[in-house]
Amino acid sequence: MRTLPAVTDRKEFDALVVRTDYEDDRAWQDVTAALMAPWGDGVYEACVHFVDDPAWADAAVDEILPAVSADENLAVVFLADRTTMRTESHPLLAITTLTREECADDEEYEQLTEFGTEFRTTPAGVHDVHANLSIGNVGFEEYAAWAHDDAEGIYRSA
C-alpha cells in the first residue's frame, strides 16, 4: 500500500474533496463547478478544499483514510472517482472517517455503520452532508440510509 501526501491547509469548515480519477479533465471541471455553486437555496457560499494531485490517482479507500486521519475535525471525505466522472449527475463517494476505536463497543459501531461506511451523493449534497456532520446535527448513518432508500443509491440534497 502506498503512502499518500498529507492533506494540509484545509480550513475546519471546508468539505474535503479528493480527485482519484484523472482520465477526463472536462468532467473534473464540471464537478468542481457544481461543488462551488452556492448551496442551501443559494444562501450559503461553498467552502471546499480540493485535492487535485495525480499522486492520488486510483487511490483506494484504505489508502485515503490513513492519509486524512490526522485531521480530527474531519467526519467525512468525498472522492471524485471514476463513477463520479462518468455519471451525468457526478455523484461523489462520501466516506466516513469513523473507526471502530472511536465507538464504545461493537454494537455502537454496527449501529453507526448499519448502511455502510460510504454512500454516493450529488455535488449539491456534499455541503449538506459535510455541514451537518461537522456540527453533529445529522449522523452519517442517516445520510447513508437516505442514499440506501434512493432508487440509484444516491443521497440528493433537498
Image (spheres, grey):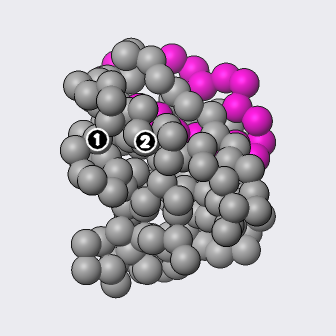
Q: Which mark is residue 21?
A: none
Between marks 1 and 2, how big is the CA–CA gap?
Answer: 8 Å
Whether residue 8 is visible, yes or no, is: yes
Residue 42, picture quadrant: bottom right
Q: Which mark is residue 85?
A: 1
Q: Amino acid at mark 2?
A: Val
Residue 91, image x, y percentages: 36, 55
Task: Indicate whether residue 15 is drawn in magenta.
Answer: yes
Q: Nearer the viewer, residue 9 or 91?
A: 91
**Neighbour tally class for label 2: few under 14, some 14-19, many 20 plus, Cα within 10 Å:** many
Q: Residue at x 43, y 70 (%)?
A: 155
Q: How many marks?
A: 2
Q: Which residue is mark 2?
A: 31
Whether residue 118 is visible, yes or no, is: no
Residue 9, image x, y percentages: 72, 24
User: Is 108 placed above or below 87 here?
Assistant: below
Residue 158, picture quadrant: bottom right
Task: Indicate whether residue 57 is drawn in magenta.
Answer: no
Q: Earlier in the sequence, mark 1 or mark 2?
A: 2
Image quadrant holding the N terminus, namely: top left
Q: Residue at x 60, y 73 (%)?
A: 139
Q: Nearer the viewer, residue 89 or 79?
A: 89
User: Is 65 placed above or below 135 here?
Assistant: above
Q: Which residues are magenta?
A: 1-19
